[in-house]
Amino acid sequence: MSRRELAARVLGNSVVNRLGRVSDGGLRILAYHRILDGDPAELPFDEGVVSATTEQFYHQMRFVRENFDVVTFGGLLQCEREGKQWPNRGLIVTFDDGYRDNYANAFPVLRELKLPAVIFLATGHIGEEVLFWWDLIAFCFKETELESVLLSEISTEPVSLAGHAERKEAIQRVLAWTKKAPDEIRRAFLERLPGLLDVTLDDDIAFAMHLSWDEVRTMSKGGVEFGSHTVTHPVLSNVGADRLDLELRESKEAIDRELGKEAVAFAYPVGRGRNFTADSMKAVEKAGYRFAVSYDEGVAQPGVSDRYALPRIHVESNQSLNLFRAKLMFSRFMVGGQDERSSDR
Ligand SMILES: [Zn+2]
């Protein structure tokens, strides 16, 4: 059996053409957060959102450029307006949250390789020095000098902070809890957390951590499309209808106003399927978005996948280039689990 026949057999209905390229008609949407160099474990903030180093990202994008048609949500919309199908080997490169390293590290690579991308902004953090809540949690637990802490919301027993492993475990427990707690309770808890752990947050703690609107505009002119990721990044299933509408509407208005271009796509915060509801999806459509992406792992199938819950393929810093390639080529068969420790933020 030739390599091509073998690949075709493994891929089932997918078609592997003579160049070995997959063309199963699926749309692959890569999900990145931060592109950061150095050891993620050394970061005083949340290491779980580091997706790749600049060098890893460069090699990933080289592979993507050679094997897929890299497009944006605006491009998909244009296809639909012209009555055409989505590209047969379509792929969208996305980043969530709006970290400044997307500009400093990812954008030069995208520009060099002439690839478009989409960045989903939590607009309340753009140009602001306010930590995202997962970074705040990680910072407090990494910085504290306490040996244990009682967090009554999370357990009746004190949480041990004796060693590195215990602190890591504590961060994961608190992250998991904050993803499920009603939004007002989460906010109140996070207000108290630095005090509970006896940690002081400097005013400039998040200096140059998030994108500025000038950087966003520069990238917008350089082929990067911007979508919304809400204003304050709440888990949508944990907020009421009024808050939901405000988060969807105000973030879109900010992007449309600052860029003079319409945000057509939305990414659900902490976007596993359980973290948004049918009502959230309806509200996203009503707010004027034309596409929405989840953080459930998979390949979107035109005409089959719900355009308001398109799955994505996660990219994690500990993935080898071979695994990255395999996930892209065989991702129809590599549906991810619901690991609480994954990078959903
Ligand atoms: Zn996010």
Image (cartoon, helix red, strand yellow):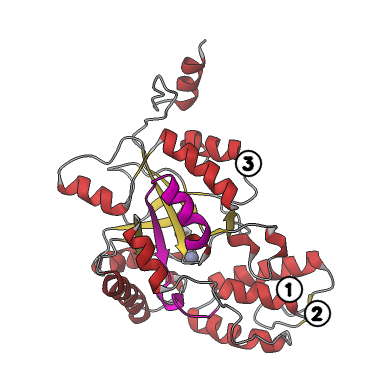
Q: Amino acid at mark 1?
A: Lys
Residue that appears at 62% across and 51% down? 317
Element class at badge 3: loop
Give whichever of discs 2 and 3 has the lower sequence position. Answer: 2
Residue that appears at 25% across and 65% down? 262
Label 1: how many Cα within 10 Å (few below 14, some 14–19, many 20+)? many
Give whichever of discs 2 and 1 has the lower sequence position. Answer: 1
Indicate the quadrant where residue 40 lies: bottom right
- Where does the image place residue 82, in percent across and percent down from the top left? 15, 45
| Mark number displayed over residue 320 | 3
In the image, residue 104 above or below residue 184: above
Residues in magenta?
103-130
Label 3: how many Cα within 10 Å (few below 14, some 14–19, many 20+)? few
Element class at badge 1: helix
Closer to the camera in the image, 105 or 246: 105
Give whichever of discs 1 and 3 has the lower sequence position. Answer: 1
Residue marked by disc 2: 148
Mark 1 vs mark 3, CA separation in Å = 27 Å
| Mark number displayed over residue 142 | 1
Indicate the quadrant where residue 152 lies: bottom right
Mark 2 vs mark 1, CA separation in Å = 12 Å
User: Can you tell me whether the CB of the residue at mark 2 lies under 8 Å from the nearest atom of ligand 1?
Assistant: no
Indicate the quadrant where residue 213 lies: bottom left
Q: Closer to the observer: label 2 or label 1?
A: 1
Evaluate whether residue 180 shows in this view: yes
Q: Amino acid at mark 2?
A: Ser
Element class at badge 2: strand
